[in-house]
């Protein structure tokens, strides 16, 4: 006989879980008591706040492809997970969130620290459960993992009333249950796709996070090369295609490249792989790829025709579909088209001649890139620094970029970096943040120090809420409402107060030596990068606009 | 694209919260529910929801795909008004004092409705039928003064020998 908490541990082990992120509390005391017994097999990472635990589980999952796990107590513990779960939901990240709740007999009575977390998380999970009978616990846990990683991945929540975690039950070990296999693509859809490919003069591949989650980068590269098709991606796709490749156009959308956005405007065939035409990609849906047939390949049927109507819909696992297409297509050239579109690629040069000048964020980013290997994992928060990073860092490997795309969660990065570092102890993890985002969840610096994680945090500190301020500049006539908070935080002292190392870059000549010193330091380092409040993110297509309205200078 | 009404027949796992999941999906995706009926079925493991929706064809397709993404949903069938058996139940309490009573009873007979209860001043009537017939009946009753009414919304099954269990998900 085992109690519910021990059953939970056994199920986690059967699912191959060796690390969980969480925060204890009254309703999960039994679970934490079991964790104490299983501490040699399950490493529990204590964060400063449950939101950090949820983002850590997310970072763990994004950087490995495995399911991330977080644990929180009932009531406020559970609600603190909500932003993290919603972040994972919007970016299709597989996590299992386990929350405690009050005993079954106390449910529905507004008991202390009681909250209806299954009700609250219904719209932001793939599915959720409340287990009221310990006999259903093990099947529920395995089902949760199956749902989280099957098809289009996503978060699943399991709510466990306290008495269920202590109730005794006969436990029989179960064999590992994997993800449900996707249906093979329909033959007729493959034929229709091949027919469109054969006749296209100006094809373009636009891919998204689906390429990363289905590990289909090799197949994508093969298709692009065999057919000589230029390639662009959404932010979620970055790392799925080599950024130095001649066919690579860069990111598409609001802050995407001129080449990618122009290609979408002019192509006659758009091959969409695991992407969803978000409003940050297709700002103006009726003007997006206006002259193109669309082949939409996705594992999630509900993405078809949701935002853009496709000519051919291929439902299935991307890796499998692309493999079939690669085997069937002949070699093709669209040299004139490729030359024309790739000639629009721009390299942004940074002026570093004045050593006493204010450092340019792009200069700092390029220096970090030069001083790290292809193996580096880059986490970001949300805002200008995020756009500069995805535009200029040139992510070189899949699962190496951790960034909140769909939800746009400021404060995501530090937790995500922690999760990624535990999942990848041998790799350098870097967080690029901004002072706005960093102030939201900097409490997790204490986690960096407690576990002595060698994460280097670069805070692009312009002392304003830069992205919103940029919009106020462009669209609100320089009326800077609530974007100049006049904070006086000394980030170097702050780092030291938390037990980390603090450094500062305030001049161009300090960029390289300080970045080098930060990586040499070994433990957690926070680098305060003092940049100009007027550095902008460009190019920019206004919301609802098209590439014809692209702003390249301001 | 023209707006029309469609009847969604949805087979779901009989879990608590299924109705909330479905209603929540409609609300957050901006689909309009005209009526929704949820009930257990001949198989205790399943429940069935009959949902009437106003929209265009693209909405109906998207709605079907979104419903099928819910873990608890087993099958979704969109029924056409013309080729399904559909019916709705009305309960209505009308003012029926003195000489009004005779004409009301006559109308009840004409429409194939049924009197459930007679009070001092009122009659409570039950009617089942297609939505249009019920609308007509209600309109006729309005002149006597409707005090309160409750309608179930449409319930429907496919015509012919096919059932929801026969089709592919």
Image (tube, coloured by chain):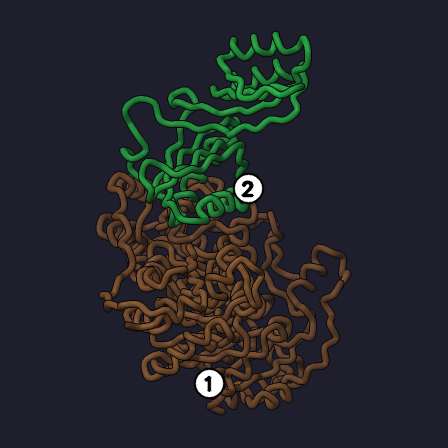
Foreground pick, B56 / B46: B46
Q: Residue at x 30, y 22 (%)?
A: B160
Residue A412 appears in the figure: yes
Residue A200 % position (x, y): 35, 43
Residue marked by disc 2: B30
Residue marked by disc 1: A453
Residue A476 % position (x, y): 74, 56
Q: Is residue A142 left or right of residue A522?
A: left
Farthest residue to the front: give it: B120
Assign the C terminus of chain A to one quadrant of the image: bottom right
Q: Residue at x 35, y 68 (%)?
A: A66
The colour applied to the residues of chain B in this rendering is: green
The colour applied to the residues of chain A in this rendering is: brown
Foreground pick, A247 / A81: A81
Quarter where residue A9 is shown = bottom left
Question: Helix or strand or loop: what does disc 2 sit on?
Answer: loop
């Amino acid at each position: 006989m085992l109690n519910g908490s021990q059953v939970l541990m056994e199920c986690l082990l059967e699912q191959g879980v060796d690390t969980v992120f969480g925060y204890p509390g009254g309703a999960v005391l039994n679970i934490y008591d079991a964790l104490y017994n299983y501490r040699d097999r399950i490493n529990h990472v204590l964060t400063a706040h449950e939101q950090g635990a949820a983002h850590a589980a997310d970072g763990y999952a994004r950087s490995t492809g495995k399911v991330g796990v977080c644990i929180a107590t009932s009531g406020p513990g559970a609600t603190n997970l909500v932003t993290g779960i919603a972040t994972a939901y919007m970016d299709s990240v597989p996590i299992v969130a386990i929350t405690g709740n009050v005993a079954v007999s106390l449910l529905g009575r507004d008991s202390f620290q009681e909250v209806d977390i299954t009700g609250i998380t219904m719209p932001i999970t793939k599915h959720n459960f409340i287990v009221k009978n310990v006999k259903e616990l093990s099947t529920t846990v395995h089902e949760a993992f199956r749902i989280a990683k099957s098809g289009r991945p996503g978060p699943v929540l399991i709510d466990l009333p306290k008495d269920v975690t202590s109730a005794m039950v006969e436990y029989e070990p179960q064999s590992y249950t994997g993800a449900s296999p996707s249906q093979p693509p329909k033959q007729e859809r493959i034929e229709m796709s091949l027919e469109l490919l054969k006749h296209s003069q100006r094809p373009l591949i636009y891919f998204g996070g689906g390429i990363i989650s289905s590990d289909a980068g090799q197949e994508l590269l093969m298709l692009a090369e065999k057919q000589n098709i230029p390639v662009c991606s959404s932010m979620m796709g970055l790392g799925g295609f080599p950024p130095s490749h001649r066919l690579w156009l860069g990111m598409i959308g609001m802050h995407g490249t001129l080449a990618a956005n122009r290609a979408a405007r002019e192509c006659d065939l758009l091959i969409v792989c695991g992407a969803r035409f978000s409003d940050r990609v297709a700002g103006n849906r009726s003007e997006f790829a206006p002259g193109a047939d669309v082949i939409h390949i996705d594992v999630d049927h509900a993405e078809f025709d949701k935002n853009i109507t496709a000519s051919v819909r291929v439902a299935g696992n991307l890796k499998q579909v692309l493999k079939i297409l690669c085997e069937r297509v002949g070699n093709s050239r669209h040299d004139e088209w490729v030359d024309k579109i790739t000639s629009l690629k721009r390299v942004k040069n940074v002026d570093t001649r004045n050593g006493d000048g204010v450092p340019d964020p792009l200069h700092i980013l390029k220096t970090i890139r030069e001083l790290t290997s292809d193996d580096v994992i880059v986490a970001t928060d949300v805002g200008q620094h995020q756009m500069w990073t995805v535009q200029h860092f040139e992510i070189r490997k899949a699962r190496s970029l951790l960034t909140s795309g769909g939800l746009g969660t400021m404060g995501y990065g530090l937790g995500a970096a922690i999760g990624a570092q535990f999942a990848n102890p041998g790799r350098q993890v870097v967080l690029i943040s901004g002072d706005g985002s960093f102030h939201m969840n900097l409490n997790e610096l204490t986690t960096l120090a407690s576990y002595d994680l060698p994460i280097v945090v670069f805070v692009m500190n312009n002392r304003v809420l830069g992205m919103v301020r940029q919009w106020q500049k462009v669209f609100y006539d320089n009326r800077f409402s609530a974007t100049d908070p006049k904070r006086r935080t000394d980030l170097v002292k702050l780092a030291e107060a938390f037990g980390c190392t603090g450094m500062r870059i305030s001049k161009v000549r300090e960029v390289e030596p300080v970045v080098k010193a930060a990586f040499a330091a070994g433990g957690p380092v926070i680098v305060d990068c003092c940049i100009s409040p007027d550095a902008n993110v460009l190019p920019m297509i206004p919301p609802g606009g098209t590439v014809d309205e692209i702003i390249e200078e301001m | 694209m023209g707006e029309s009404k469609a009847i969604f027949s949805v087979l779901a796992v009989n879990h608590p919260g299924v109705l909330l999941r479905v209603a929540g999906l409609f609300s957050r995706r901006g689909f309009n529910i005209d009526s929704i009926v949820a009930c257990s079925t001949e198989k205790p493991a399943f429940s069935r929801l009959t949902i009437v929706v106003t929209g265009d064809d693209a909405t109906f397709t998207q709605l079907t795909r979104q419903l099928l993404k819910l873990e608890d949903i087993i099958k979704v069938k969109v029924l056409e008004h013309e080729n399904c058996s559909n019916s709705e139940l009305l309960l209505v309490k009308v003012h029926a004092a003195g000489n009004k009573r005779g004409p009301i009873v006559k109308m009840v007979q004409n429409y194939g409705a049924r009197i459930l209860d007679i009070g001092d001043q009122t009659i409570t009537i039950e009617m089942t039928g297609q939505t249009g017939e019920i609308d007509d009946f209600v309109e006729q009753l309005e002149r006597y003064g409707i005090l309160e009414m409750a309608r179930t919304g449409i319930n429907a099954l496919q015509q012919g020998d096919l059932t929801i269990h026969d089709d592919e998900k």
